[in-house]
Amino acid sequence: MTSGSWTLLDGIGVLVTNDPGIGAGRLGLLRDAALLLGDGVVQWVGRSGREPHADNVVRRELDGRAVLPGFVDSHTHPVFAGDRAEEFASRMAGQPYTAGGIRSTIAATRAATDAELDATVTRLVAEARRSGTTTIECKSGYGQTVADELRSLRLAATHTPETTLLAAHVTPPEFDGRADDYVRMVIEEMIPACAPHAKWIDVFCERGAFDADQCRAVLTAGVAAGLAPRVHGNQLGPGDGVQLAVETGAASVDHVTHTSADDIAALADSTTVATLLPGAEFSTRTAYPDAHRLLDAGVTVAVATDCNPGTSYTTSMPLCVALAVREMHMSPDEAVWAATAGGARALRRNDIGVLRPGCRADVIALDAPSHVHLAYRPGVHLVSHVWKDGMRQ
């Protein structure tokens, strides 16, 4: 093989490939492994000492560390201003969560400059990268005017191609009591202006936000403008979000905290991923969903952070893996797959979340001998190395 400047990661104790054709089990585990990265992609995967010859290879000895695909965080809200720490403290003192707190963030975001908003996004994306996230989805939704949603998406697009227009987040104050009028504005003005800067269209189908008919109208308009659908659903109680997501062919329905047997059956018979957001249950002190109700039915499950200032102010995928294991009854293998390959499925990507030749060279190494330590040692910063597109970060 010839190369430019490629990198050989050698001395890997346990390699998670997420490809059963390469290694053992669903995680495609290889022991005593090596990984060759070059030109932004994985060039070769196999046993240490069996790598093909390539010119100009830099060898990195990992001394028995576990290596995984970079985390894929398929649900975040990082474009915002302000702080809701007092709201968090009130919830911890017993005040229940409702969707209305979003309005305080809307006011702060509208008042912020572009530079202030970009500084927040830059800080949070860098924070996520340090904890092993190599692909991140970024939503708008805290501006809720055409101009503010547009600038949110433009800022997000400088950090990721996975940008989402979440215009139907809540009804903004100037549309109090006129949710249908706001939906009409979203469809007629906001989507046409913002669609060139987004990949996805999302809705919050929930009490205190928008009903199924309103959400369906927004998703339909978004799809007509070339955007792919996503749904927030069934977070605060039983509702129509899951069924709407399946009906519209959404890539993912997120939260799914309260699901009926019919909801689970519909998901199992669809291509829609159920994305679990354990940081939201942690931060709102509400009951966690039982992931095995979904997994046992054959539903594809992802895990993401839901990073936002009100209900899950974390960028840490390792924390969410640990919470998914401890509180959502997932095994460590299931949670790691959901945070990598599952997140890729939620973004309809097959070039990330897996380490096989031709896929993006997005790789993390742990200061631990096994991926199990992500749940076994919660709260400990275990990510020692991050490569994005083959470049050490």
Image (tube, rainbow, N blue to C red):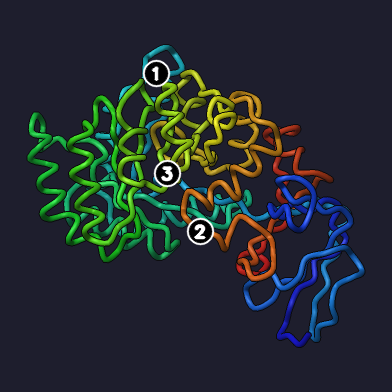
The x and y percentages for residue 103 are: 24, 34
User: If the image is split into quadrants, where does the N terminus sit?
Assistant: bottom right
Total labels drawn:
3
- The residue located at (68%, 67%) in the rendering is 392
Q: Residues within 10 Å of mark 3 (few under 14, many from 20)?
A: many
- Label 1 element class: helix
The x and y percentages for residue 167 are: 24, 46
- Label 2 element class: loop
Q: Quadrant of residue 61?
A: bottom right
Residue type at mark 2? Answer: Arg
Residue type at mark 1? Answer: Ser
- The residue located at (48%, 48%) in the rendering is 346
Q: Quadrant of residue 152?
A: bottom left
Mark 1 or 3: in front is: 3
The residue under label 1 is: 90
Q: Quadrant of residue 184?
A: top left
Q: Sequence order check: which comes first, mark 1 or mark 3?
A: 1
Residue 29 in the figure: left or right of residue 156? right
Q: CA distance from mark 1 to mark 3?
A: 31 Å
The residue under label 2 is: 349
Q: Residues within 10 Å of mark 1 (few under 14, many from 20)?
A: few
- Label 3 element class: strand
The x and y percentages for residue 73 are: 52, 48
Mark 1–mark 3 contact, CB under 8 Å? no
Q: Nearer the viewer, residue 307 or 161?
A: 161
Q: Mark number for residue 252?
A: 3
- The residue located at (10%, 37%) in the rendering is 180
Q: Sequence order check: which comes first, mark 3 or mark 2?
A: 3
Q: Residue pushed farthest right? A: 49
Mark 2 or 1: in front is: 2
